[in-house]
């Protein structure tokens, strides 16, 4: 069993082997599971015995089978672990224990350790790239936990900005949307007098939601609207497409206003978009329900 422990500076915990095989070489904290011992518990026990720290398993990183000149056939299971207590210090089977930059490691005793670390780096590549880009705005960010705190504040801020944008430009957004419908879905051109007020009502509801206000109507009101559109012979597939374009128009306006100016704002906008998608799904459901009745 072996463990990968990485700190906020992206340094991985290694131990220097005291015994053969590979005496004097560095490796991840590693050792054998005892008879009947759970593999996770064995990995955590070896971590404490070799590096002096207690941890908790986050996830399985790799399972590798190797032929070793000293031990013969081995299965090496590697877990990602988070330290929960203790200070790093070498144990009975180690002469040293310390952190090394994960991109500047010494030669490791076990090829399986190198393989597991490569898998770990691949897993976190995008996360680290995201954190690095956010550090340009928030130098204090060095972990996903800190990133979550900042993005929480950013979501609230961006929600208010988008809400104010909709209150200011709702008429203009609907006009641009109507022009797009006329061009992309010509069959809807004759229905714009019906569709534009519906779209403005939807944008108003999105605005209320983003700013934390109660939506001023109940979604079931759209059932009657769906019936009316059916009676006017407006085709349902084109109606659903029109609402998809309505949602797109919000983000096009945000881009035009340069609201999404930083990587952090673009990232936090993704979650806001999920909330907006949920509302549009409800609009579509009740419109379609009334249409089909």
Image (cartoon, rainbow, N blue to C red):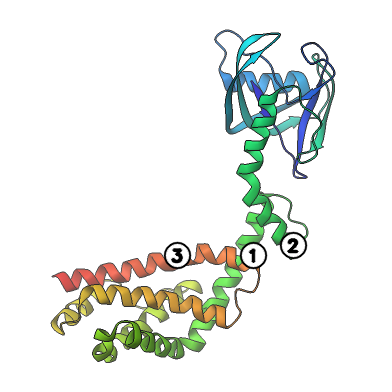
Q: Earlier in the sequence, mark 1 or mark 2?
A: 2
Question: Badge 3 local density, few (<14 within 10 Å), some, or many (20+)?
Answer: some
For the point 37% across and 79% down, which residue is it? 202
For the point 76% across and 22% down, which residue is it? 109
Q: Is residue 243 visible?
A: yes
Image location (x, y in percent) of residue 272: 50, 66
For residue 189, which quarter of the picture?
A: bottom left
SS for dot 2: loop
On residue 246, the disc is: none
Image location (x, y in percent) of residue 174: 40, 87
For the point 74% across and 51% down, which residue is it? 142
On residue 264, the disc is: 1
Q: Where does the C terminus fall, quadrant-wise?
A: bottom left
Q: Where does the N terminus fall, quadrant-wise?
A: top right
Q: Do the residues under discs 1 and 2 have CB atoms within 8 angstroms?
A: yes
SS for dot 1: helix
Q: Report the label total.
A: 3
Q: Earlier in the sequence, mark 3 or mark 1?
A: 1
Q: CA distance from mark 3 to mark 1?
A: 18 Å
On residue 275, the disc is: 3
């Amino acid at each position: 069993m072996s463990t990968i422990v990485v700190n906020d500076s992206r340094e991985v915990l290694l131990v220097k082997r005291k015994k053969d095989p590979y005496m004097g070489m560095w490796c991840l904290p590693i050792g054998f599971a005892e008879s009947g011992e759970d593999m996770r518990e064995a990995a955590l026990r070896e971590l404490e015995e070799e590096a002096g720290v207690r941890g908790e398993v986050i996830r399985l990183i790799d399972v590798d089978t190797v032929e070793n000149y000293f031990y013969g056939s081995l299965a090496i299971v590697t877990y990602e672990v988070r330290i929960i207590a203790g200070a790093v210090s070498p144990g009975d089977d180690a002469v040293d224990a310390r952190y090394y930059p994960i991109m500047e490691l010494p030669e490791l005793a076990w090829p399986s350790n190198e393989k597991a670390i490569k898998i770990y780096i691949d897993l976190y590549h995008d996360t680290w790239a995201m954190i690095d880009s956010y550090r340009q705005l928030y130098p204090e960010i060095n972990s996903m936990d800190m990133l979550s705190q900042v993005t929480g504040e950013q979501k609230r801020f961006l929600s208010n900005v988008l809400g104010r944008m909709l209150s200011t430009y709702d008429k203009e957004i609907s006009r641009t949307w109507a022009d797009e419908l006329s061009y992309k879905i010509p069959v809807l051109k004759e229905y714009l007098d019906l569709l534009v007020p519906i779209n403005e009502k939807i944008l108003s509801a999105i605005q209320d939601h983003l700013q934390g206000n109660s939506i001023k109507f109940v979604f079931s009101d759209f059932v009657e609207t769906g019936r009316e559109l059916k009676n006017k012979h407006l085709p349902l597939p084109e109606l659903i497409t029109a609402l998809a374009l309505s949602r797109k128009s919000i983000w096009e306006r945000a881009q035009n206003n340069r609201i999404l100016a930083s990587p952090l704002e673009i990232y936090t906008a993704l979650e806001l978009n999920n909330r907006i998608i949920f509302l549009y799904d409800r609009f579509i459901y009740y419109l379609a329900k009334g249409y089909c009745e």
